[in-house]
Image (tube, rainbow, N blue to C red):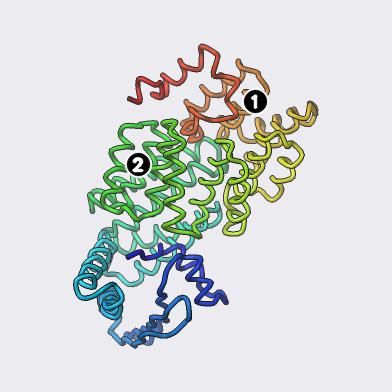
Protein backbone atom coordinates (compact mmCIF):
# COMPACT_ATOMS: atom_id res chain seq x y z
CA UNK A 1 0.00 0.00 0.00
CA UNK A 2 1.31 3.44 -0.97
CA UNK A 3 0.60 6.40 1.30
CA UNK A 4 1.27 9.83 -0.22
CA UNK A 5 3.98 11.88 1.45
CA UNK A 6 2.89 14.51 3.95
CA UNK A 7 4.23 17.43 1.88
CA UNK A 8 2.32 16.33 -1.22
CA UNK A 9 -0.90 15.67 0.66
CA UNK A 10 -0.74 18.95 2.58
CA UNK A 11 -0.11 20.93 -0.60
CA UNK A 12 -3.83 20.70 -1.41
CA UNK A 13 -4.92 22.23 1.89
CA UNK A 14 -7.21 25.17 1.26
CA UNK A 15 -7.27 24.63 -2.50
CA UNK A 16 -10.40 24.08 -4.55
CA UNK A 17 -9.31 20.80 -6.16
CA UNK A 18 -11.61 17.87 -6.91
CA UNK A 19 -11.04 14.38 -5.52
CA UNK A 20 -10.18 13.19 -9.02
CA UNK A 21 -7.54 15.92 -9.48
CA UNK A 22 -5.96 15.20 -6.11
CA UNK A 23 -5.97 11.45 -6.69
CA UNK A 24 -4.33 11.80 -10.09
CA UNK A 25 -1.60 14.14 -8.85
CA UNK A 26 -0.82 12.01 -5.80
CA UNK A 27 -1.22 8.67 -7.57
CA UNK A 28 -3.63 7.29 -4.96
CA UNK A 29 -7.00 5.54 -5.10
CA UNK A 30 -8.44 6.75 -1.78
CA UNK A 31 -8.40 10.05 0.06
CA UNK A 32 -8.72 10.88 3.75
CA UNK A 33 -9.73 14.38 4.69
CA UNK A 34 -11.21 16.03 7.73
CA UNK A 35 -11.02 18.82 10.22
CA UNK A 36 -9.78 19.45 13.74
CA UNK A 37 -11.52 21.80 16.16
CA UNK A 38 -10.35 22.69 19.65
CA UNK A 39 -12.63 23.89 22.43
CA UNK A 40 -11.13 24.30 25.87
CA UNK A 41 -9.50 21.00 26.80
CA UNK A 42 -11.46 19.06 24.17
CA UNK A 43 -10.48 18.35 20.58
CA UNK A 44 -12.94 17.18 17.95
CA UNK A 45 -11.68 15.42 14.83
CA UNK A 46 -13.95 14.76 11.87
CA UNK A 47 -12.48 12.26 9.40
CA UNK A 48 -13.76 11.01 6.06
CA UNK A 49 -12.59 8.31 3.63
CA UNK A 50 -13.54 8.65 -0.03
CA UNK A 51 -12.73 7.17 -3.42
CA UNK A 52 -10.44 9.42 -5.43
CA UNK A 53 -11.91 8.55 -8.81
CA UNK A 54 -15.54 9.30 -7.96
CA UNK A 55 -15.42 11.25 -4.70
CA UNK A 56 -17.82 8.68 -3.20
CA UNK A 57 -17.75 8.74 0.60
CA UNK A 58 -16.93 5.30 2.00
CA UNK A 59 -16.75 6.10 5.69
CA UNK A 60 -16.84 9.01 8.11
CA UNK A 61 -16.55 9.34 11.86
CA UNK A 62 -16.12 11.96 14.56
CA UNK A 63 -13.62 11.61 17.40
CA UNK A 64 -13.91 13.74 20.53
CA UNK A 65 -11.04 13.44 22.98
CA UNK A 66 -9.35 15.32 25.77
CA UNK A 67 -6.53 17.45 24.41
CA UNK A 68 -3.94 15.51 26.41
CA UNK A 69 -5.00 12.33 24.56
CA UNK A 70 -4.75 13.84 21.09
CA UNK A 71 -1.62 11.87 20.16
CA UNK A 72 -3.41 8.57 20.70
CA UNK A 73 -6.05 9.56 18.18
CA UNK A 74 -3.67 9.34 15.21
CA UNK A 75 -3.05 5.65 15.92
CA UNK A 76 -6.74 4.97 16.46
CA UNK A 77 -7.67 6.85 13.31
CA UNK A 78 -5.08 5.08 11.15
CA UNK A 79 -6.18 1.66 12.39
CA UNK A 80 -9.84 2.48 11.79
CA UNK A 81 -9.16 3.53 8.21
CA UNK A 82 -7.24 0.33 7.52
CA UNK A 83 -10.17 -1.67 8.86
CA UNK A 84 -12.40 0.14 6.38
CA UNK A 85 -10.03 -0.74 3.55
CA UNK A 86 -9.47 -4.33 4.64
CA UNK A 87 -11.68 -5.93 2.03
CA UNK A 88 -10.28 -3.73 -0.71
CA UNK A 89 -6.78 -5.10 -0.19
CA UNK A 90 -7.85 -8.60 -1.09
CA UNK A 91 -9.20 -10.13 2.09
CA UNK A 92 -8.29 -10.60 5.72
CA UNK A 93 -4.66 -11.58 5.18
CA UNK A 94 -3.94 -8.59 2.97
CA UNK A 95 -5.87 -6.34 5.32
CA UNK A 96 -3.88 -7.65 8.25
CA UNK A 97 -0.63 -6.94 6.42
CA UNK A 98 -1.81 -3.42 5.61
CA UNK A 99 -2.83 -2.86 9.22
CA UNK A 100 0.59 -4.00 10.43
CA UNK A 101 2.24 -1.66 7.94
CA UNK A 102 0.14 1.28 9.10
CA UNK A 103 0.89 0.47 12.74
CA UNK A 104 4.61 0.32 11.95
CA UNK A 105 4.46 3.64 10.10
CA UNK A 106 2.57 5.30 12.95
CA UNK A 107 5.13 4.01 15.45
CA UNK A 108 7.93 5.29 13.23
CA UNK A 109 6.20 8.68 12.99
CA UNK A 110 6.02 8.84 16.79
CA UNK A 111 9.76 8.16 17.18
CA UNK A 112 11.54 11.20 18.54
CA UNK A 113 8.23 12.94 19.21
CA UNK A 114 6.73 14.86 22.11
CA UNK A 115 3.73 14.75 24.38
CA UNK A 116 3.66 18.53 24.53
CA UNK A 117 0.78 19.63 22.30
CA UNK A 118 2.09 23.14 21.74
CA UNK A 119 5.58 21.86 20.88
CA UNK A 120 4.03 19.40 18.42
CA UNK A 121 2.03 22.18 16.77
CA UNK A 122 5.19 24.27 16.43
CA UNK A 123 6.99 21.30 14.89
CA UNK A 124 4.24 20.92 12.29
CA UNK A 125 4.53 24.63 11.52
CA UNK A 126 8.26 24.18 11.09
CA UNK A 127 7.71 21.31 8.67
CA UNK A 128 5.30 23.43 6.66
CA UNK A 129 7.74 26.31 6.34
CA UNK A 130 10.78 24.11 5.76
CA UNK A 131 9.12 22.32 2.85
CA UNK A 132 8.65 25.62 1.03
CA UNK A 133 12.42 25.77 0.42
CA UNK A 134 12.98 29.51 0.40
CA UNK A 135 15.26 31.61 2.59
CA UNK A 136 12.34 33.42 4.23
CA UNK A 137 10.47 30.19 4.96
CA UNK A 138 13.65 28.52 6.25
CA UNK A 139 14.02 31.24 8.88
CA UNK A 140 10.35 30.86 9.83
CA UNK A 141 10.86 27.10 10.12
CA UNK A 142 13.92 27.58 12.29
CA UNK A 143 12.04 29.86 14.69
CA UNK A 144 9.24 27.30 15.05
CA UNK A 145 11.62 24.38 15.61
CA UNK A 146 13.67 26.29 18.15
CA UNK A 147 10.56 27.28 20.09
CA UNK A 148 9.49 23.62 20.10
CA UNK A 149 12.82 22.56 21.62
CA UNK A 150 12.45 25.24 24.28
CA UNK A 151 9.07 23.81 25.27
CA UNK A 152 10.40 20.24 25.20
CA UNK A 153 14.21 19.91 25.23
CA UNK A 154 13.80 16.16 24.67
CA UNK A 155 11.92 16.62 21.38
CA UNK A 156 14.37 14.88 19.02
CA UNK A 157 12.38 15.55 15.85
CA UNK A 158 12.42 19.27 16.55
CA UNK A 159 16.19 19.17 17.07
CA UNK A 160 16.50 17.38 13.73
CA UNK A 161 14.43 20.19 12.22
CA UNK A 162 16.79 22.77 13.71
CA UNK A 163 19.74 20.87 12.23
CA UNK A 164 18.22 20.50 8.78
CA UNK A 165 17.17 24.13 8.56
CA UNK A 166 20.54 25.46 9.69
CA UNK A 167 22.11 23.15 7.10
CA UNK A 168 19.82 24.51 4.37
CA UNK A 169 20.71 28.09 5.32
CA UNK A 170 24.42 27.22 5.27
CA UNK A 171 23.99 25.82 1.76
CA UNK A 172 21.80 28.51 0.21
CA UNK A 173 21.81 31.72 2.24
CA UNK A 174 24.19 34.48 1.18
CA UNK A 175 23.47 36.81 4.08
CA UNK A 176 26.34 37.52 6.44
CA UNK A 177 29.08 35.89 4.39
CA UNK A 178 31.52 33.35 5.83
CA UNK A 179 30.80 34.27 9.46
CA UNK A 180 27.09 33.47 9.13
CA UNK A 181 27.87 30.33 7.12
CA UNK A 182 30.18 29.08 9.87
CA UNK A 183 27.55 29.86 12.53
CA UNK A 184 24.82 28.00 10.63
CA UNK A 185 27.03 24.97 10.06
CA UNK A 186 28.14 24.88 13.70
CA UNK A 187 24.52 25.12 14.87
CA UNK A 188 23.52 22.34 12.48
CA UNK A 189 26.21 20.05 13.90
CA UNK A 190 25.19 20.81 17.49
CA UNK A 191 21.52 20.14 16.77
CA UNK A 192 22.29 16.83 15.02
CA UNK A 193 24.32 15.72 18.02
CA UNK A 194 21.47 16.68 20.35
CA UNK A 195 18.84 14.85 18.27
CA UNK A 196 20.88 11.65 17.99
CA UNK A 197 21.73 11.69 21.69
CA UNK A 198 17.98 11.54 22.38
CA UNK A 199 17.01 9.12 19.58
CA UNK A 200 20.04 7.40 17.95
CA UNK A 201 17.98 5.82 15.17
CA UNK A 202 15.93 8.85 14.18
CA UNK A 203 15.82 8.95 10.34
CA UNK A 204 15.35 12.72 10.21
CA UNK A 205 18.45 13.27 12.35
CA UNK A 206 20.46 10.81 10.29
CA UNK A 207 19.33 12.69 7.18
CA UNK A 208 20.64 15.94 8.65
CA UNK A 209 23.96 14.32 9.57
CA UNK A 210 24.32 12.65 6.16
CA UNK A 211 23.63 15.96 4.43
CA UNK A 212 26.33 17.68 6.48
CA UNK A 213 28.78 14.89 5.66
CA UNK A 214 27.98 15.22 1.94
CA UNK A 215 27.67 18.97 1.48
CA UNK A 216 30.19 20.39 3.94
CA UNK A 217 32.53 17.70 5.29
CA UNK A 218 33.04 15.96 1.92
CA UNK A 219 33.08 12.72 3.91
CA UNK A 220 31.69 10.51 1.18
CA UNK A 221 32.13 7.18 2.98
CA UNK A 222 30.66 8.54 6.19
CA UNK A 223 27.71 9.99 4.30
CA UNK A 224 27.13 6.66 2.55
CA UNK A 225 26.96 4.83 5.88
CA UNK A 226 24.71 7.43 7.48
CA UNK A 227 22.26 7.68 4.58
CA UNK A 228 22.20 3.91 4.09
CA UNK A 229 21.07 3.57 7.69
CA UNK A 230 18.50 6.34 7.26
CA UNK A 231 17.09 4.68 4.13
CA UNK A 232 16.85 1.33 5.88
CA UNK A 233 14.82 2.96 8.65
CA UNK A 234 12.65 5.13 6.37
CA UNK A 235 12.82 3.90 2.75
CA UNK A 236 9.76 5.93 1.71
CA UNK A 237 11.02 9.28 3.03
CA UNK A 238 11.48 11.38 -0.13
CA UNK A 239 13.94 13.75 1.53
CA UNK A 240 16.25 10.87 2.45
CA UNK A 241 15.97 9.52 -1.09
CA UNK A 242 16.91 12.98 -2.42
CA UNK A 243 19.95 13.09 -0.11
CA UNK A 244 21.01 9.67 -1.37
CA UNK A 245 20.73 11.04 -4.90
CA UNK A 246 22.91 14.01 -3.97
CA UNK A 247 25.60 11.66 -2.69
CA UNK A 248 25.50 9.74 -5.98
CA UNK A 249 25.99 13.06 -7.82
CA UNK A 250 29.10 13.68 -5.71
CA UNK A 251 30.41 10.24 -6.63
CA UNK A 252 29.73 10.91 -10.29
CA UNK A 253 26.96 8.31 -10.64
CA UNK A 254 24.56 10.53 -12.56
CA UNK A 255 22.21 7.84 -13.84
CA UNK A 256 21.79 6.37 -10.36
CA UNK A 257 21.19 9.84 -8.94
CA UNK A 258 18.49 10.59 -11.51
CA UNK A 259 16.89 7.24 -10.74
CA UNK A 260 16.73 8.22 -7.06
CA UNK A 261 15.32 11.66 -7.84
CA UNK A 262 12.61 10.02 -9.95
CA UNK A 263 11.82 7.77 -7.01
CA UNK A 264 11.54 10.82 -4.74
CA UNK A 265 9.12 12.42 -7.21
CA UNK A 266 7.06 9.23 -7.26
CA UNK A 267 6.94 9.23 -3.46
CA UNK A 268 6.13 12.95 -3.22
CA UNK A 269 4.82 14.25 -6.58
CA UNK A 270 4.46 17.87 -5.55
CA UNK A 271 7.72 18.16 -3.63
CA UNK A 272 9.50 21.08 -5.36
CA UNK A 273 12.94 20.01 -4.13
CA UNK A 274 12.59 16.52 -5.62
CA UNK A 275 11.54 17.92 -8.99
CA UNK A 276 14.21 20.63 -8.90
CA UNK A 277 17.04 18.15 -8.38
CA UNK A 278 15.60 15.89 -11.06
CA UNK A 279 15.23 18.72 -13.59
CA UNK A 280 18.64 20.23 -12.82
CA UNK A 281 20.48 16.96 -13.32
CA UNK A 282 18.53 16.03 -16.41
CA UNK A 283 19.87 19.30 -17.83
CA UNK A 284 23.39 18.56 -16.57
CA UNK A 285 23.32 15.22 -18.42
CA UNK A 286 22.02 16.95 -21.58
CA UNK A 287 18.55 15.42 -21.44
CA UNK A 288 17.24 18.81 -22.38
CA UNK A 289 13.71 17.94 -23.50
CA UNK A 290 13.04 16.09 -20.25
CA UNK A 291 14.56 18.91 -18.21
CA UNK A 292 12.48 21.58 -19.94
CA UNK A 293 9.36 19.55 -19.22
CA UNK A 294 10.17 19.49 -15.50
CA UNK A 295 11.32 23.06 -14.83
CA UNK A 296 7.90 24.74 -15.30
CA UNK A 297 6.53 22.35 -12.67
CA UNK A 298 9.31 23.38 -10.29
CA UNK A 299 8.42 27.05 -10.74
CA UNK A 300 4.73 26.28 -10.32
CA UNK A 301 5.35 24.45 -7.06
CA UNK A 302 7.79 26.96 -5.57
CA UNK A 303 8.94 29.97 -7.61
CA UNK A 304 11.01 31.24 -4.66
CA UNK A 305 13.23 28.16 -4.41
CA UNK A 306 16.92 28.51 -5.37
CA UNK A 307 17.50 27.40 -8.98
CA UNK A 308 13.75 27.34 -9.75
CA UNK A 309 14.38 29.73 -12.67
CA UNK A 310 18.15 29.53 -13.14
CA UNK A 311 17.94 25.77 -13.57
CA UNK A 312 16.05 26.25 -16.83
CA UNK A 313 18.65 28.86 -17.70
CA UNK A 314 21.36 26.22 -17.23
CA UNK A 315 19.52 23.88 -19.59
CA UNK A 316 19.38 26.55 -22.30
CA UNK A 317 23.01 27.52 -21.65
CA UNK A 318 24.21 23.96 -22.19
CA UNK A 319 22.20 23.81 -25.41
CA UNK A 320 23.89 26.97 -26.64
CA UNK A 321 20.64 28.95 -26.51
CA UNK A 322 22.20 31.90 -24.77
CA UNK A 323 19.47 34.52 -25.03
CA UNK A 324 16.87 32.04 -23.78
CA UNK A 325 19.22 31.19 -20.90
CA UNK A 326 19.36 34.81 -19.77
CA UNK A 327 15.61 35.29 -20.14
CA UNK A 328 14.89 32.14 -18.12
CA UNK A 329 16.69 33.51 -15.06
CA UNK A 330 14.27 36.41 -14.61
CA UNK A 331 12.55 35.95 -11.27
CA UNK A 332 15.35 33.79 -9.84
CA UNK A 333 15.46 34.11 -6.04
CA UNK A 334 19.16 33.26 -5.83
CA UNK A 335 20.95 36.26 -7.33
CA UNK A 336 24.23 34.33 -7.37
CA UNK A 337 22.60 31.63 -9.54
CA UNK A 338 21.20 34.23 -11.93
CA UNK A 339 24.58 35.94 -12.28
CA UNK A 340 26.29 32.61 -12.96
CA UNK A 341 24.02 31.88 -15.91
CA UNK A 342 24.15 35.45 -17.25
CA UNK A 343 27.96 35.60 -17.02
CA UNK A 344 28.33 32.34 -18.94
CA UNK A 345 25.62 33.07 -21.50
CA UNK A 346 26.97 36.52 -22.35
CA UNK A 347 30.43 35.01 -22.74
CA UNK A 348 28.97 32.40 -25.07
CA UNK A 349 27.45 35.23 -27.13
CA UNK A 350 30.83 36.98 -27.15
CA UNK A 351 29.25 39.94 -25.37
CA UNK A 352 32.39 40.35 -23.31
CA UNK A 353 31.59 43.62 -21.47
CA UNK A 354 28.27 42.20 -20.28
CA UNK A 355 29.91 38.90 -19.32
CA UNK A 356 32.62 40.73 -17.38
CA UNK A 357 30.02 42.89 -15.62
CA UNK A 358 28.03 39.87 -14.47
CA UNK A 359 31.19 38.12 -13.26
CA UNK A 360 32.25 41.25 -11.39
CA UNK A 361 28.86 41.43 -9.68
CA UNK A 362 29.13 37.76 -8.72
CA UNK A 363 32.65 38.19 -7.36
CA UNK A 364 32.00 41.46 -5.55
CA UNK A 365 28.75 40.32 -3.96
CA UNK A 366 29.23 36.64 -3.28
CA UNK A 367 32.94 35.80 -2.97
CA UNK A 368 32.39 34.28 0.50
CA UNK A 369 29.28 32.29 -0.36
CA UNK A 370 29.51 31.43 -4.08
CA UNK A 371 33.19 30.68 -4.70
CA UNK A 372 32.22 27.50 -6.52
CA UNK A 373 29.97 29.38 -8.94
CA UNK A 374 32.76 31.88 -9.62
CA UNK A 375 35.04 28.94 -10.43
CA UNK A 376 32.38 27.64 -12.83
CA UNK A 377 32.33 30.94 -14.71
CA UNK A 378 36.10 31.04 -15.08
CA UNK A 379 36.14 27.40 -16.22
CA UNK A 380 33.44 28.12 -18.79
CA UNK A 381 35.54 31.03 -20.08
CA UNK A 382 38.59 28.78 -20.34
CA UNK A 383 40.57 30.68 -17.69
CA UNK A 384 41.93 27.58 -15.98
CA UNK A 385 44.28 29.30 -13.56
CA UNK A 386 41.48 31.42 -12.12
CA UNK A 387 39.10 28.47 -12.09
CA UNK A 388 41.45 26.32 -10.00
CA UNK A 389 42.19 29.28 -7.73
CA UNK A 390 38.48 29.67 -6.98
CA UNK A 391 37.94 25.91 -6.64
CA UNK A 392 40.61 25.85 -3.94
CA UNK A 393 38.96 28.82 -2.28
CA UNK A 394 35.62 26.98 -2.41
CA UNK A 395 37.25 23.96 -0.76
CA UNK A 396 38.60 26.08 2.09
CA UNK A 397 35.18 27.66 2.53
CA UNK A 398 33.44 24.25 2.48
CA UNK A 399 31.25 25.36 -0.40
CA UNK A 400 28.48 22.76 -0.91
CA UNK A 401 28.67 23.27 -4.68
CA UNK A 402 31.75 21.05 -4.63
CA UNK A 403 29.48 18.05 -4.07
CA UNK A 404 28.62 18.33 -7.78
CA UNK A 405 32.22 18.70 -8.91
CA UNK A 406 32.94 15.41 -10.68
CA UNK A 407 30.43 15.67 -13.53
CA UNK A 408 29.70 19.40 -13.55
CA UNK A 409 29.28 20.31 -17.25
CA UNK A 410 30.43 23.88 -16.62
CA UNK A 411 33.84 22.55 -15.56
CA UNK A 412 34.41 20.55 -18.76
CA UNK A 413 37.33 22.78 -19.84
CA UNK A 414 39.32 21.74 -16.76
CA UNK A 415 39.26 17.97 -17.11
CA UNK A 416 42.26 17.63 -19.42
CA UNK A 417 44.40 19.75 -17.10
CA UNK A 418 46.74 17.78 -14.75
CA UNK A 419 45.49 19.90 -11.86
CA UNK A 420 42.01 18.40 -12.26
CA UNK A 421 42.85 14.91 -11.02
CA UNK A 422 45.02 16.40 -8.30
CA UNK A 423 42.09 18.49 -7.07
CA UNK A 424 39.76 15.49 -7.22
CA UNK A 425 42.21 13.60 -5.04
CA UNK A 426 42.30 16.47 -2.56
CA UNK A 427 38.50 16.20 -2.38
CA UNK A 428 38.59 12.41 -1.98
CA UNK A 429 36.90 12.06 -5.38
CA UNK A 430 39.61 10.41 -7.48
CA UNK A 431 38.47 7.20 -9.16
CA UNK A 432 40.54 4.90 -6.94
CA UNK A 433 39.29 6.69 -3.81
CA UNK A 434 35.67 5.93 -4.66
CA UNK A 435 36.06 2.20 -5.28
Quarter of the figure that contains the N terminus: bottom left
In the picture provided, is 107 more to the left or to the right than 340?
Answer: left
How many numbered circles are shown?
A: 2
Looking at this view, is 258 or 341 the one in front? 258
Q: Element under label 2?
A: helix
Q: Residue furthest top?
A: 418
Going 52% across and 58% down the picture, which residue do you hit?
Answer: 132
Quarter of the image for residue 43 reads bottom left
Residue 10 x %, y %: 46, 68
Q: Quadrant of the C terminus?
A: top left
Return the x and y of residue 80 as percentages of the image width and height. 27, 79
List x then y, in percent, for residue 160: 34, 52
Q: Is residue 102 left or right of residue 240?
A: left
| Residue 330 in picture, x, y percent from top left | 71, 48
- How busy is the neighbourhood of tag 1: few (under 14 within 10 Å), some, or many (20 plus)? many
Instruction: Return the disc, 2 or 1, that comes first in the chain's sequence.
Output: 2
Quarter residue 217 falls in: top left
Q: Name the residue: 64% across, 24% down.
A: 378
Above or below, 161 against 254 in this view is below
The residue to which callout 2 is attached is 210
134 sits to left or right of 315: left
Q: Does any portion of residue 68 appear in the rendered image? A: no
Q: Residue furthest front?
A: 90
Residue tagged 1: 380
Marks 2/1 in contact by CB < 8 Å: the verdict is: no
Amino acid sequence: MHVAARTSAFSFKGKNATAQEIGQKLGVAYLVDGSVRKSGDAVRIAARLARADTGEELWSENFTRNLKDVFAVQTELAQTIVEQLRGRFGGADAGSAAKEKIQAEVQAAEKGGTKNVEAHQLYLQGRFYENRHSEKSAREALAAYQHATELDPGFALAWAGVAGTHGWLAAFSTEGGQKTFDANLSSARDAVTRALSIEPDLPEALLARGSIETNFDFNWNGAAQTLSKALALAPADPNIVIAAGNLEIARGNMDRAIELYRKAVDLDPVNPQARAFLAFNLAATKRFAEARAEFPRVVELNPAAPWAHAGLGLSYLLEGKFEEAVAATEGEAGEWARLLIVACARWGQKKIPEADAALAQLTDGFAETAAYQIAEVYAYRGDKDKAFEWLERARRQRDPGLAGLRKDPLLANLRADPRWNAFLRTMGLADDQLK
